[in-house]
Amino acid sequence: GAVVSQHPSWVICKSGTSVKIECRSLDFQATTMFWYRQFPKQSLMLMATSNEGSKATYEQGVEKDKFLINHASLTLSTLTVTSAHPEDSSFYICSAKGDNSPLHFGNGTRLTVT
Amino acid sequence: GDSVTQMEGPVTLSEEAFLTINCTYTATGYPSLFWYVQYPGEGLQLLLKATKADDKGSNKGFEATYRKETTSFHLEKGSVQVSDSAVYFCALSLPGIQGAQKLVFGQGTRLTINP
């Protein structure tokens, strides 16, 4: 079964609203979580790396005020897309790793902004 | 910068055909190399990996050899099955913050196997 749960699996929101995506590790403590974005027919682009209890490290070109990442516990990280616009429509994927566990991926969230 | 380029899809084969999906990389230093597979409706799963030159990763009949001289990590399988239909991602990893491995992915190759 899935060891990383990502929710929701899809969401549609109106332009200007904010959307929160959750990533949970189900049976291990995720000391590090990664957030990726995937455009159609393109590769997964790393957006940010988060470690529990500290601020996320964003990749170059990713707006930290637009994509808020919170890794408040060892089993939960959230990505909030603030003031979403149609160009934010994409497939967002999280992955999680513990000190003694390999990297596991969530099933992804498809965001559509209308 | 560091990057991964893989064969464009989609790739459609008949059952029991031989499969090759090409993957080449550009990286500073000596990355580890991976193939991930994404079955319909599921998350990415690690298929195989190799951590140094000339290593061969293998799993479920798939193989890939880390070729430093050609900076390649091509995925092969001798006889594919319908259940192998999925999207395959080649990736490399680099050391990241606090030792966490950051992955750089190729664009993915959609494979469809017809019975």
Image (cartoon, coloured by chain):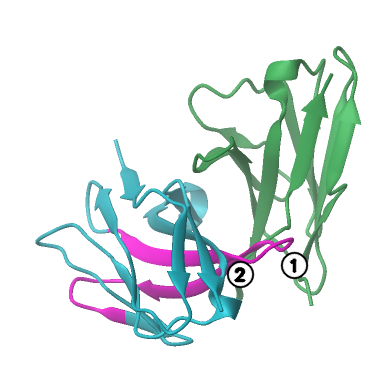
Q: Name the spot of residue B27 as percent of width and height, x first.
A: 25, 47
| Residue A65 in view of the camera | no
Q: Residue at 73% across / 57% down in the picture?
A: A107
Q: Residue at x 86, y 12 (%)?
A: A16
Question: Quick one: which residue is furthest to the left in this view?
Answer: B69
Q: Which residue is mark 1?
A: A29
| Residue B48 x %, y % | 43, 75
Q: Please give the name of the residue rendered at 38% of the width and 84% of the height, measured from the top-left corner.
A: B58
Q: Is residue B88 visible?
A: yes
Chain (cyan): B
Q: Amino acid at mark 2?
A: Asp
Q: Which residues are magenta?
A: B31-56
Earlier residue among tags 2 and 1: 1
The N terminus of chain A lies in which quarter of the figure?
bottom right
- The answer to which image quadrant residue B50 occupies is bottom left
Mark 2 burial class by Cα count in 10 Å: few <14, some 14-19, many 20+ = few
State the image coordinates of residue A92 (x, y, percent, origin top left): 69, 41
Q: Which residue is mark 2?
A: A99
As drawn, A44 above or below B87: above
Give the colour in which the image draws chain A. green
Q: Eyeballing the image, is B14 above or below B3?
A: below
